[in-house]
Amino acid sequence: MTTPLSSSSAASANGQGTAPLPDAAARRLPRATASSGGDPSGPARPDGRFPLAGLVVLSVAVFLSITAETLPMGLLPQMSADLAVTESQVGLLVTVFAFTVVVTATPVMALTSRVARRRLLLAVVVVLGLANGVTALLPDYGWIVAVRVLGGMAHGVFWSLVAAYAARLVTPERIGTAVSITLAGGSMAFVAGVPVATFAGQLVGWRWVFAVIGVLLLACAVLIVLVLPPVAATPRAATDTAGDRGAPRDRTLLPVLVLCAGVAAAIVGHYVLYTYIVPFLTAELGVPDSQISLWLLGYGVAGLLGLALSGTVLARRPLRGIVVVAAAMALGLVVLATGLGGTLGTVLAFGLWAVGFGALPPMLQTRMLTTSSDAMRDIASAFYTSAFNIGIGGGALVGSLILAGGGLAALPWSYLLLLLIGVGCVVVSAVLAARRRA
C-alpha cells in the first residue's frame, strides 16, 4: 500500500530542502537531537526488524480512542434518562467531539511540533483516559459537554500523531503494512468495541462503561512507555510550511492539501449513504428488519478483509490500489443503485463496497504520508484528520439534504459522484507531487 518516499519528502532537516537526496538517504529517518525535541534515547531506526509490538500498542490505542469517541451513540437511552436530556442532545456529544477535532487538530499540532512524539502521544492518551473517567463521575450534561471538548482536542492530536508515528517506525516500503496494523484497531472498534460497550451499558449502566474505558486508556499509556519505541519530533523545516520569516514553503504542501480535499470528498460520499444505511437496506433493497444486524455485521467483517488487503496485496502501490479499490466500490454502488443481478448481485455489491471502504482509508493515509515531506508529516496528518472528520459530519448533513430532495434512491448515485471527485483529487495530487520532485 505504499511506494518509496520521494527524494523531496526526505529533504534534510536543516530547513533548506534544496537538492534531492539519493534513494539510500531518502530511506533513512531522522535521528532525534536536542534541537529537534526528540526523546533522549533517540528515535527508532528501521534496522530490518519489524516493530510489531509497538504497532500493536498503537492499534490498541486506536481501538480505545474510537470506542471512546462513539460511546454516546450506543448509550443514548441510558445517558438520556440519567442526565434528564433528550437523546438528540446526547447524540450531540459525538458531534461536539468531532467538531472539536476539526477545529483544533492542526493548530495544536503546530504548537506542539517540538515536543517529543512519544511524550506527546503519552500525554494525549492520558488526557483521553482522564476525560472518560471524569465523564463517568459528572452529574451535569453541561460539564460533560465541556469534558468532551477537552477529549476532542486530545483525540485530534492523537489521530494526527498515530499514523505518522507508525510510519517512522519502519522503512518507507513498509509504511503501508505498518499503517494497516495500526488502523486495524479502528475497524475492530466498530465491529466489537462499540457493540460490547453498548451491551455492557445495558447491564451495568453507562457510567461504568466510561470508567472502564478510561482505565483501559490509562493502562494503554503504560504500554506506550514500556513497549513503544521513541521517534524524533518534527524537524525544524516543518515551520516552513507557513512560509513565515521568509522561509520557502514546503514543496509538498499543495499536493497534501489537494489529497486531503479528495479525502474529504470521498468520506462525505461514504457517510451520505452509510448514515442512512438502515432505511436504504429496508426500503430500497428489501432487507427484512430482522436481518439488518446480520448485514451490518457482514459489512464489518468484509471491511476487515479490505483492511487486510490494504496492508498486504495493495501495500506497495497505494496510488494504483486506490484507483482499483475505488473502481470496485463504484461497481458495487452502481449495482446497489440499479438492482442489477437480483438478490445475489445485491449481496455481492454490498460486500464489494464494504471490502473497498475497509481498504480505502488506510491507503489514503499511506498515500498522504508518502506524499508529505518528513518535515511536514505531522501537520499533514492533522490536515488529514480534519478532512476525515469534515467528511463524517458533512456526509450526514449532505445526505439529509439529498434524502429530502431526491429520496433514498439518490444516495448511492451521490456517493458515486463524490467518490470519483475524491479519486480525481488523489490523482491530481500525485501529478503535483511528481512535478515537485522533478
Image: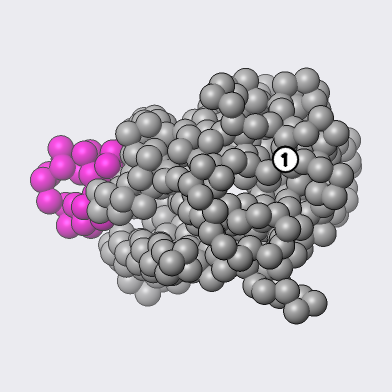
Query: Alpha-carbon neighbours of circle 1 within 10 Å: few (<14), some, or many (≥20)?
Result: some
* Quarter occupied by the N terminus: top left
Task: Assess whether residue 336 is covered by the magenta stretch.
Answer: yes
The amino acid type, in three-letter code, at marker 1 is Arg
Going by the image, does 195 lie left or right of 39? Answer: left
Quarter occupied by residue 302: top left
- The foreground one among 112 and 44 is 44
Residue 352 seen in the current view: yes
The image shows residue 77 at horizontal and vertical percentages of: 66, 40
Residue occupying image coordinates x 57% and y 68%: 251
Rendered residue at 23%/44% (across/down): 349
- What predominant SS class does the magenta segment belong to? helix
Q: Quick one: 395 or 15, which is closer to the camera? A: 15
Q: Where does the magenta region start and end?
A: 330-352
| Residue furthest left in the image | 341
Query: Image check: 373 left or right of 174?
Result: right
Residue named by callout 1: 31
Q: Position of residue 53 (x, y in %)?
A: 62, 20
Queried whether the magenta region covers residue 367, the answer comes back as no
Rendered view: 279 above or below 175: below
Vertical placement of 237 versus 329: above or below?
below
Residue 62 % position (x, y) = 63, 35
